[in-house]
Amino acid sequence: MYSQGLIGADGRTEESEAFLEAFQKRIDAEEKIEPKDAMPEGYRRTLIRQIGQHAHSEIVGMLPEGNWITRAPSLKRKAALLAKVQDEGGHGLYLYAAAETLGVSREQMTEELHSGKAKYSSIFNYPTLSWADIGAIGWLVDGAAIMNQIPLCRCSFGPYARAMIRICKEESFHQRQGYEIMLTLCRGTPEQKEMAQDALNRFWWPALMMFGPHDKDSAHSEQSMKWKIKRFSNDQLRQKFIDATVPQAEYLGLTVPDPDLRWDPELNDGKGGYRHGEIDWDEFWRVVKGDGVMNRDRIAARRKAWEEGAWVREAALAHAAKREGRRAAAE
Amino acid sequence: MKDENLFNALIELADDHSILCHRLGEWCGHAPILEEDLALTNMALDLIGTARNLYTYAAEIEGRGRSEDDLAYLRNERQFRNLLMVERPNGDFAHTMLRQLFFAAFMEPYWQAALESRDETLRGIAGKAVKEMGYHIRHAGEWVIRLGDGTEESAQRMQAAMEALHIYVDELFHSSPAAEAAALAGLLPERGALRTAWLENITPILAEARLELPEAPNPQIGGRAGLHGEDLGHILCEMQYLQRSHPGATW
């Protein structure tokens, strides 16, 4: 699951006017750009950064949900959660592979995640405190991710667009599964419903922040739109998400924790939509910059897995080399 | 109850699968490489699938309206009947893989033999599980070989895992009175008869991994009588906490 408006994209590029124009023509003709095609450095850099952030989000995202595998309340829920977290790992794997086609290695990307240089979706820096959080993450976080990712299926970069088609199918399943967890809780005991409301209270605003800063503050969106890496603006996607999600919360009998939320018939070109209250961008930037509740723990957990696994990876390489040596000697 | 022995024998098997699944689930997100996060989860999913089939069938045999979750989440430490091996902490990756190999190398011939069961439901469960255990042997076996014949460090860790785990092997071949009765009735395989098949699965892998299975003159046995180590209670605390703290709730 992912994502948020790309953090810190840098679309600067230094190719000749003629080259850029020819490239733009291909983009405008909706041709897919493939790994071996010539492309502006800025395009390559933006994609490496974006696909890398996306992949890291999937991998770090395994941690808050993995936190509940051993405490899942039934065998069915445990199996579904195992499968979901496995799907997220699978998404990470495709995405690392898609980024590798642009000339960056998985090791490099992993090191950048561990050093704090590469970002991931800030939503995963919030803790999962109750079982209802697993429902809320599926419903809201995967729900927000789908809004972001459906347009990515038409991204101009072929490998990313193709990876996204399968990922979206799985995310859509996760979203329904999460909503079903919420529905079960809301139809359950008063304590279960309270748990569900509390999860919504904690995850609503961070889910809105997943779409990234308002368009007027989003420094590098314009170039990404022009290159058709991005198809809709942060605010457009956030609006779509709110409009889809508020009625779902009503159906659950839960209250969206925004006293300023109201229906505005003028929104969405007169089709109507929900206006939301002020998003706390200070909180967003604080969490993005490393001061969320779980930032340090998330990176520490990833580093620990990587460092404690080093001997396993070394052994696998050593064994492969021995095997190759024996095979060569036998010939 | 239709068949108390069969019920108890099914609970033993279901507990093995559920507890081992739980242990593998602890790795999720923390494996040495991403591919292993996926593989360990896959094996955990196989195990929970079999556990659910077995608990559900046990509940049906019991005929008292209990569900798979009642059996998994509302019994205490002393009522759990799993093998001691499966409750052992994960340790490092070498421990986890060797434990998986030991278990799968037994369950594969076990389910193979269960394909001949007089009981149709058990034949169905066996048919699915036998294929899964086959690939668990391959996956865990390949890692045991890589680690056993990899670097000096990995070989030492593999050796340490062997020393820690071999004392739990013998319990695989022991039958409780319930399992004995189910075997005599032609419902489930006789565990003691599977030692040769287990060794046939294990021996070529250990040879390639440059490992030896040490003698275990004093093996650890007790799970089938509910006599566990201290780790199981902690597993159950975690696993059962929501069911216990919200009695009767639906999840």
Image (spheres, coloured by chain):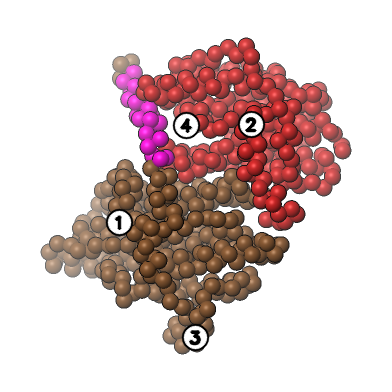
Chain colours: A brown, B red
Q: Is residue B9 above or below residue A241?
A: above
Magenta residues, dominant SS class: helix
The residue drawn where x is 34% and y is 46% is: A114
User: How far apart are the two marked residues, 3 and 4, measured between alpha carbons?
Assistant: 56 Å
Label 1, on which residue? A49
The residues tagged by marks 2 and 4 sit, at their Cα atoms, a distance apart of 21 Å
Q: Earlier in the sequence, mark 3 or mark 1?
A: 1
Q: Amino acid at mark 3?
A: Asp
Q: Are marks 3 and 1 on the same chain?
A: yes
Residue where numbered disc 4 is placed: B93
Q: Are marks 3 and 4 in contact (CB under 8 Å)?
A: no
Q: CA distance from mark 3 to mark 1?
A: 37 Å
Q: Nearer the viewer, mark 2 or mark 4?
A: 2
Q: Looking at the image, is mark 3 or mark 2 nearer the viewer?
A: 2
Question: Which residue does the numbered mark 3 point to in the structure image?
Answer: A264
| In-image side of B50 versus B61 (left or right) | left
Residue B183 visible to the viewer: no
| Apparent side of residue A57 relative to residue B224 in the rendered image (left or right) | left
Across and down, in percent, residue B9 comes to 76, 31
Find out whether residue B106 is within the magenta segment: no
Q: Chain of mark 2?
A: B
What's the mark number on residue B230? 2
Kind of element beneath mark 1: helix
Q: Residues within 10 Å of mark 4 (few under 14, many from 20)?
A: many
* Residue A310 sits inside the magenta stretch: yes
* Secondary structure beneath label 2: loop
Q: Earlier in the sequence, mark 2 or mark 4?
A: 4
Q: Amino acid at mark 2?
A: Glu
Q: Is residue A293 visible?
A: yes
